[in-house]
Image (cartoon, rainbow, N blue to C red):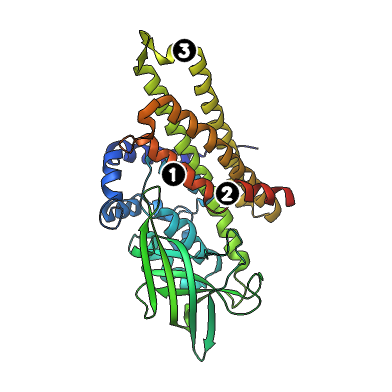
Amino acid sequence: MNLELSEEMIMLQDMLSKFLNKQYSFEQRQTLSRNGIGYSEDNWQQFADMGLLGVPFDEQYGGFGFGQMGLVVVMEAIGKGLIVEPYLASVVLAGQLIQQAGSEAQKHAILEPLIAGEFKLSFAYVERQSRYNLADVACQAEKQGAQFCINGNKSVVFNSETADKIIVSVRTSGETISQSGISLLLVDKDAAGLSTRHYETVDGLRASELSFNNVMVAEDALVGALGNAYEAIQTVIDSATAAVCAEGIGVIAQLREKTVEYLKTRKQFGQALSDFQVLQHRCVDMFMHEEQMRSLAYLAAIKVSDGEAVESRQSVSAAKVYLGDARTIVAEQAAQLHGGIGVTDELDVVHYVKRLTMLNSLFGDRDFHMQRFCEA
């Protein structure tokens, strides 16, 4: 199996690397994450100008058709730069859900302005009781004439504060944990009856708790077939899981590089810490985890692109399990080898550790994916 990047992917990788080196320092990232909406609209428009927002989408909607492997390249760079712009929420999750389940009219109406940087989406699918079960949907939508009436709550909705519309998974029929009877509805972020509580996550990003109290949406807000959204949601979540595994490559690579650099400059007993063989071995362990993570993430991306459900989910879960293992080892090594400063908020290392911890929990933690892999 060929895991090498194509010429187009390498060009995309180089462009992103130049952007991060010139325009996205850690200090700039911290300033953005702690003020206003938590990211830069100018950066978002620049992402659109560079074509990043169109990477996974089909050419007929204005995208580049790079698919999952394109997302691997972008997400690895996002991990390296600790980018706070809502790429995961708007493009990887909600945007791909429109491409997966939306009508042709919805795809053209939504994806084209999204790719141009003029429109943002968010996806509300998590509920407090659901854990990682995508079928556990209690938020109700009742058909009332030519409208749907939504009641219920959604948790940890990334970047809904700045989204123009929110895609909400709702139950239109069936039992609470049934895979059938789940539908998708597009809701304006300022819809009457929708209340929100915004907050900053541990890794410096933004999320919200949403409460729907008789929120009315038109019939044409339905995305996909009524009561038949589960498979589309599962497919997109698997794609997003593979994408965050690729982001994990970037985070792990930065932790290793910054640790090696620190050991070369920090001296103890009259010599650089990098001269001590036992510390060299620990850096090699970090490098091995980085390379193994890259291989598994690339394999997961290839399997997701192939579209074979069972093999795809096995590969995605295998990569996510390894991300959990790598998080424990790499994060601990980086913090310990930096000593006391390795846990201070002023050092970028601790923010990479926080993001790696969050990536382990997104879309199912290590234990969840180990169980799913074994069941498959």
Name the N-terminal-most of marks 1 and 3.
3
Q: Is mark 2 on a helix, strand or loop?
A: loop
Q: What element carries label 1?
A: helix
Can you give x and y, in whole percent of width and height, for residue 337 in the image?
43, 24
Q: Residue furthest right?
A: 375
Determine crowd level at label 1: few under 14, some 14-19, many 20+ residues with C-alpha closer than 10 A.
many
Determine crowd level at label 3: few under 14, some 14-19, many 20+ residues with C-alpha closer than 10 A.
few
| Three-letter residue code for mark 2 | Asp
* Residue for badge 1: 355
Count how many numbered circles sit on residues in the image. 3
* Residue for badge 2: 365
Q: Residue furthest front?
A: 340
| Three-letter residue code for mark 3 | Phe
Seen in the picture, residue 255 relative to 37 is either above or below; the reply is above
State whether residue 276 appears in this view.
yes
Residue 8, numbered circle: none
- Residue at screen point 32% across, 41% down: 19
Can you give x and y, in whole percent of width and height, for residue 246 in the image?
51, 43
- Residue at screen point 34% across, 18% down: 265
181 displayed left or right of 350: right
State whether residue 80 appears in this view.
no
- The answer to whether mark 1 and mark 3 are in CB contact below 8 A is no
- Residue at screen point 65% across, 37% down: 1
